[in-house]
Amino acid sequence: MSRQQLFVVGAALCLFLGLYFGCNTKPKEQKIVEKARSLTLESTDVKSLVRNAKDSLSVAERSEILALEGGLKTVKSDADKVEQFKLLSQKWYQFGNAAVAGHYAEEIATIENTEQAWSIAGTTYSIAVQRTKVEKIRKFCANRAIRAFENAISINPTNTTHQVNLALCYTEYPLKDNPMKGIQMLLELNKKDPKNISVLNTLARLGLQTGQYEKAAKRLEVVLSLDANNQKATCLLAQAYQGLGNTAKAAALNDKCQLLQQK
């Protein structure tokens, strides 16, 4: 190969590398379109979620939803929108679709921006994660639940309930790269506040699910030492003792559990 040919090849290679590593070859208009697509992707998922959910409704149920959606188009104030979103959320939950109910609960939280509203949205999405078997919907709802509880925590960082609920999101839908994150969060909360009943009950319940009856029993005993008539701890401790083979204690606690449930 001649010197001139080598120069041409080298120049072409440098130009290619310069374009690949040093320059953004996409036109500005294309970058704007791609950014817009990425921003609207999740909203498209919401539209698809609602559209598919409508397909599963009966004629009468769909008529109710369409009537509420029609009413939403006529309202103007945020207060009226909130009331209409509440009706839609309640109706979808009644029809057995917690995912869409969560979407409208999130719309309410976006307007009101209170810890209670975000907590309700997060809880509704969490219920959807537990109930649905469709992976795409589970992932969507899990991500929305996490975001909702994070918003509630940002408004009131001292409310442990929001932090417990956030941790439960990660136990219901574990991260692939950190499947123990939810448990780790709960253990950290327990370390900071060893007498927090909500944290202890939650850790105990998760322990029962994995057969850790002894650890669960110890945590529940702490709860009952703090609150002798705590219904959740009493009922869970009955299960723990049953798992440990102590049928006598399990039976006594089960009787107490039933009495507390009747109150």
Image (spheres, rainbow, N blue to C red):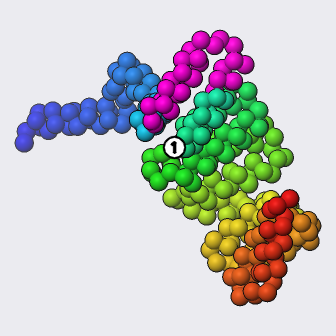
Q: Residue furthest front?
A: 60
What kind of residue is marked 1? Phe
Q: Is residue 122 left or right of residue 133?
A: right
**Vertically, is 194 above or below 161?**
below
Residue 159 among those drawn in magenta: no
Residue at the image point whose x is 29% and y is 37% from the top: 17
Examine the residues drawn in magenta and state their main secondary structure: helix
Q: Residue furthest left?
A: 1
Residue at the image point whose x is 54% and y is 52% from the top: 131
Secondary structure at numbered mark 1:
helix
Can residue 35 be seen here?
A: no
Please identify the quadrant where the N terminus is shown: top left
Q: Name the residue carrying label 1.
A: 140
Question: Residue 243, image x and y in percent?
Answer: 68, 82
Q: Is residue 197 left or right of residue 6?
A: right
Residue at the image point whose x is 70% and y is 67% from the top: 205
Question: Residue 250, image x and y in percent?
Answer: 77, 81
Please identify the quadrant where the C terminus is shown: bottom right
Write down the region rendered in magenta: 57-85
Question: Residue 207, image x and y in percent?
Answer: 68, 72
